[in-house]
Image: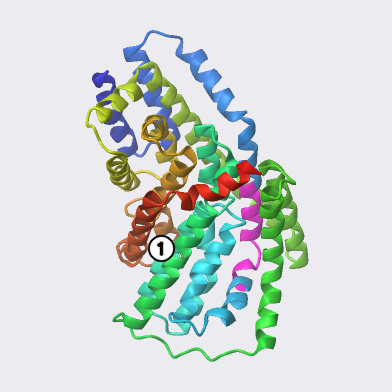
Amino acid sequence: MSGALTFIGSFLALFLGGGLWVGFALMALGILALELFRSMRIDSFLAGDIWGTATAQELVTLPLFILMGEILFHTRLSQNLFSGLAPFVRRLPGGLLHVNVLGCTLFAAVSGSSAATTATVGRITLRELETRGYDRRLALGSLAGSGTIGFLIPPSIPLIVYGVLAETSILELFIAGIVPGLILAAAYMTWIGLASTFGSAKPPPREPSTTWAHKARALGQLLPLTLLIGFVVGSMYGGFASVTEAAAIGVLGALLLTVWERQLSFAMIRAALLGTVRTCSMIGLILVGALFLSKAMARLAIPREVAAAIDSLGLSPYALILLLTLFYLAMGCFLDGLSTIVMTLPVTLPLVIAAGFDPVWFGIFLIITIEMAQVTPPVGFNLFVIRTLTGEGIGRIARAAMPFCLLMVCVVIVLTIWPDLVTWLPDQMRSR
């Protein structure tokens, strides 16, 4: 079936290069491949596949978490994050640049969208950091890198999609993402401190210390968001609610937070709902197209052929992971992370399971590699978000984000050598 594989690869590049939407491109490829290489009723096959994908119970979680993030996006959350975190980091090496990392980590715990996290935190921090004289390149890079943490810290939209496709517990994936997400945040903060202390950029004047009363007021500004995170994440990990029920709790909590902030209005609700519909429509179209193409590829025995070709290379497990890392880095230069997951998973997941890797571990590995795609040109979504916020060129933003992309590579290496960093918490949950 090498002819079918060559056909799919060639026409995929043609369709995407021509600007066709990813979902439509994947569906068109599946239809053309089956028409040329198989004799079957494509109309009923496609209709059944679309219906099965659109009505999957696990996908109910997606619009709820997206709606929660959209509601919070339209509040004063970014201002409260900066004001609440600033007193605790201003005396650290790197000063207020750490707000980018901590702010993105906190917002990721109630969003799940990398782009929303970057935009929400960046709207206030970039302006404040520039006003106070912080190095612009380091500010842009730290925001671009930190925004990707939204893919790892639960609730994560890509982790939900991976769990559905890989038939893996979404709750276990959420738990598995906590430690790697915190490791990545710690790595970013360490680099910011080192670059600010030993780098070529002139650091801004040292921020004055603050009183305990000031810190107490700052904690009060963070309290609503912290309580919301506690309700959403705690209800899942405590066994009081399923992932879908926790998402519903999050929407209710976000609405209560807007009431507390006196920002609840018809215009805000309308904007949040429209944003949710747009995002869900985009994700749904990509999922339908990718799942249909993957089933078409299965009918053509392409995954088995690719797996056999890779198996014939006699790669060790670590060499396989290195090959997949390079593969996903290359894919990330041309496709968004969600499309990469749904297109490649039918081929790569059986390979890594056969090599002895846990599917939960592979989910976290895959998420970190597609995080890199968020900050690599030409289609890095976070780069475009920051360009919209600042007007800077994509190339300049990408260069600023490069050290943080390399830190992700280092985290992948660490997690490959010590996979228990990913699997320990899920294993503890299973043993309860």
Farthest residue to the front: give it.
Answer: 431
Residue 220 position (above or below residue 115) = below
Determine the residue positioned at 62% across, 28% down: 55
Report the side of 242 relative to 107 (left or right): right
Determine the residue positioned at 50% across, 33% down: 166
How many other residues sit within 10 Å of disc 1, few (<14), some (14-19) or many (≥20)? some
Magenta stretch in the rendered image: 65-79
* Three-letter code, disc 1: Arg
What is the x, y in percent for residue 138?
38, 73
Would residue 380 be visible to someone looking at this image? no
Would residue 48 be visible to someone looking at this image? yes
Report the side of 54 relative to 308 (left or right): right
What is the x, y in percent for residue 68?
66, 52
What is the x, y in percent for residue 191?
38, 71
Determine the residue positioned at 50% across, 30% down: 288
Residue 106 position (above or below residue 211) = above
Q: Mark 1 points at which residue?
A: 387
Farthest residue to the top: give it.
Answer: 39
Element marked by disc 1? helix
Q: Main secondary structure of the magenta part?
A: helix
**In which quarter of the view is residue 260 placed?**
bottom right
Quarter the N terminus occupies: top left
**In which quarter of the view is residue 58 placed?**
top right
What is the x, y in percent for residue 84?
62, 76
Q: Does the magenta stretch include residue 217?
A: no
User: 282 and 404: which one is in front?
Assistant: 404
User: 260 and 241: which one is in front?
Assistant: 241
Q: Is residue 66 magenta?
A: yes
Quarter the C terminus occupies: top right
